[in-house]
Image (cartoon, rainbow, N blue to C red):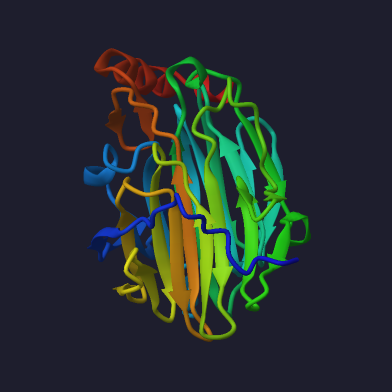
Amino acid sequence: MNTTSINSPTSSNRKLEHLVAGRATQDGDGVKLTRVLTQDLQHRLDPFLMLDHFASDDPKEYGGGFPDHPHRGFETVTYMVAGRMRHKDSAGHEGLLQNGGVQWMTAGKGVIHSEMPEQVAGVMEGFQLWLNLPSHQKMCTPWYRDIQSHEIPEFTTAQGIEVRVISGTSHGICGAMQRPVALYPTQALYLDIHFKANSIFEQPLSTDHNAFVYTYCGSAEVIAQDGLGEEVACHRLGILQNKGDLLQLRGSPGTRVLLIAGQPLHQPIAQHGPFVMNTRQELMQAVEDYQKGLFNA
């Protein structure tokens, strides 16, 4: 397909606002990871609540996995770059998440689940994104979908850039997840962009959507209107300014970048660990319901 340029005389480039290094931490049963989008960025990057990047070839750092734990009020999007993890939850669902696949889970009114490695050696790498739910969906019935790698639409630009469209739309290609705006107004865009040569990737972005890029291999540059690039080095998250309706991203061979954007909810965020509601009262109710075992219903 021809994607030489989608710029127009009236479009303007999004600039880099600032960079985030993330922090090393552990979750689950001692799984080492980098928390890139932290709680202090939740309002700035609304509707996104968290982004974790886990990557290791040492089974001692991931072998414990993520045993049973609860969620309420938001969605988790787990993208496996390499490795295998088995999902089980209190609603009776079970699935295998493996190389290149995605699990999209809506916790809704509450679910208890586990994500456990199904490997004892090799590389385990992936991402987990937390996506907020609007107030009218926070108590919806839990749901999930396993999306195998071959189900994720891909395309290659004229410059040889390979793009995987997990959700949203890019260059006319609709992603694996497409849902009605009335129920899910965030309309998240989630792209995995692989550069094979020195080239530039372009993506229109709605001016009212918050957006960021995360470089997980190599180094990328966000190109300003004057053509100058601002570097987003490896393992850095780059928050994009909300001025401008076009992202131009320059990469070199081996560069890999996640581009994530969405419509902010502009609703209060009340969080206690794995529960994300709108008010303190709702949060206290979530804790009480979990303690009463209602998440198993």
Expressed as whole percent of the image width and height from the top left, the position of residue 265 reads: 39, 27
Q: Quadrant of residue 221?
A: bottom left
Above or below — where is 57 with respect to 26?
A: below
Nearer the observer, 147 or 117: 147
Expressed as whole percent of the image width and height from the top left, the position of residue 209 reads: 41, 40
* Quadrant showing the C terminus: top right
Judge whether residue 172 can be spotted in this image.
Answer: yes
* Quadrant showing the N terminus: bottom right
Expressed as whole percent of the image width and height from the top left, the position of residue 29 reads: 41, 57
Residue farthest toward the right in the current orientation of the protein? 150
Q: How many marks?
A: 0
Residue at 59 percent of width and 26 percent of height? 181
Residue at 58 percent of width and 39 percent of height? 105
Above or below — where is 16 with respect to 68?
A: below
Q: Is residue 114 left or right of residue 3?
A: left
Residue farthest toward the front in the current orientation of the protein? 9
Above or below — where is 144 with respect to 139?
A: below
Q: Is residue 16 left or right of residue 175?
A: left
Nearer the observer, 79 or 220: 220
Nearer the observer, 252 or 228: 228
Q: Is residue 76 left or right of residue 43?
A: right
Judge whether residue 118 can be spotted in this image.
Answer: no
Nearer the observer, 250 or 12: 12
Q: Quadrant of residue 165?
A: bottom right
Residue at 71 percent of width and 67 percent of height? 2
Expressed as whole percent of the image width and height from the top left, the position of residue 254 reads: 53, 84
Residue at 51 percent of width and 20 percent of height? 137
